[in-house]
Amino acid sequence: MVPLSENSKQLALWRSLIPYLFLAPALTVLGLTVFWPAIQALYLSFTSYGFDVTQPPLWIGLDNFRELLGDRTFWTTVKNTLLYLIGVVPLLAILPLLLAILVNQKLRGMRWFRVAYYTPVVISMVVAGIAWRWLYAENGFFNQILIGLGLTESGIPWLTSPALAMPSVMVVTIWKGLGYYMVIYLAGLQTIPPDLYEAAAIEGSDGWRKHWDITFPLMRPYIFLVTVISAIAATKVFEEIYIMTQGGPLNSSKTIVYYVYELAFQELELSYACTVGLALFLVILALSILRLMSDRGEVV
């Protein structure tokens, strides 16, 4: 084996650095906008820094975390976020799959249905939230329909009732996410060989029975992926809450992310907001690890 000359070694070294040179601009932007602020937030969670931003942060150790354990509002937001997960994630894992099976049929005009179901995805959440807030209004479309049918006399307080505010916002999240997760499932359905369905039909498995025997088992990795992605998105829900309810009434729809926003930008409790954000980060980190494990096939 002929040893490499000094020039060849330098050339090989420069070639090995080329990918990192392409990555350098993106890494620089990420470092300034993501990694460094995250490190700063971690540091601030151990300090007292808030209303008077001209004063330097005062190191207080674990005091913020002790306060967090006794914060009733925080635990209310945790409960609301868990309810949001329980209410949204199962439906976003099942309904888009059924929808994908429906639009995957080779029928005339089915492409228009695909476009129609995907349209809410491209609509801005701000626009969607405002539109749904009008629909939910006291004199909005939904109440007008119910009053016209004689089902109610004064309308339903969709967004002003502690019992109905959170479910009403969940409906918007599900409506907007159906098309996005439907596309993921459609990609998975395209990988299933048609021969399997033909063989199943010979064995007497036809109609919806074939989906129970073939589609659902083969789609398990996609179902798990959609479950994890929708769980992460539901944990970070903010726009719907901010536009439609602003955490009310009586904190019934206040989630962890909205609580962080409220602490940081309304009450200017920056250090405590970083502490709450750190708790949220740990939850999302656990869900992200599950997603990576699913990509590698270690879970499913």
Image: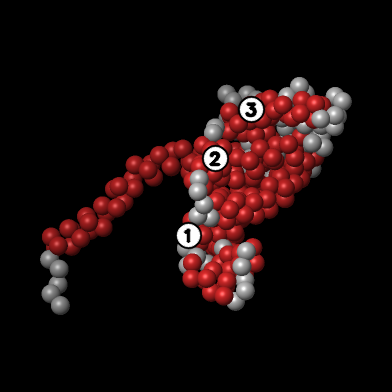
Q: How crowded is mark 3: few (under 14 residues within 10 Å), some or many (20 or more)?
A: few
Q: Disc 3 marks which amino acid?
A: Ala
**CA distance for labels 3 and 1:** 35 Å
Q: Which residue is drawn at 60% across and 59% down?
A: 224
* Rendered residue at 68%/25% (across/down): 134
Task: Tell me how the rendering is colored.
Answer: secondary structure
Q: What residue type is labelled 1?
A: Gln
**Which is more foreground, mark 2 or mark 3?**
2
Q: Which amino acid does label 2 sit on?
A: Ala
Q: What residue appears at the point 73 percent right and 36 percent down from the top-left corner?
A: 168
Q: Is residue 11 visible?
A: yes
Residue tagged 1: 190
Report, in whole angstroms, how far the alpha carbon at label 2 lies from the one at label 3.
17 Å
Horizontal side, residue 102 vs residue 161: left or right: left
Residue neighbourhood size for the residue with mark 1, other residues' Cα within 10 Å, grouped as few (<14), some (14–19), many (≥20): few
Give percent across and percent down for residue 242. Answer: 66, 30
**Residue 116 — which label?**
2
Q: In which quarter of the image is residue 172?
A: top right
The residue indicated by pointer 3 is 131
CA–CA distance in space, label 2 to label 1? 20 Å
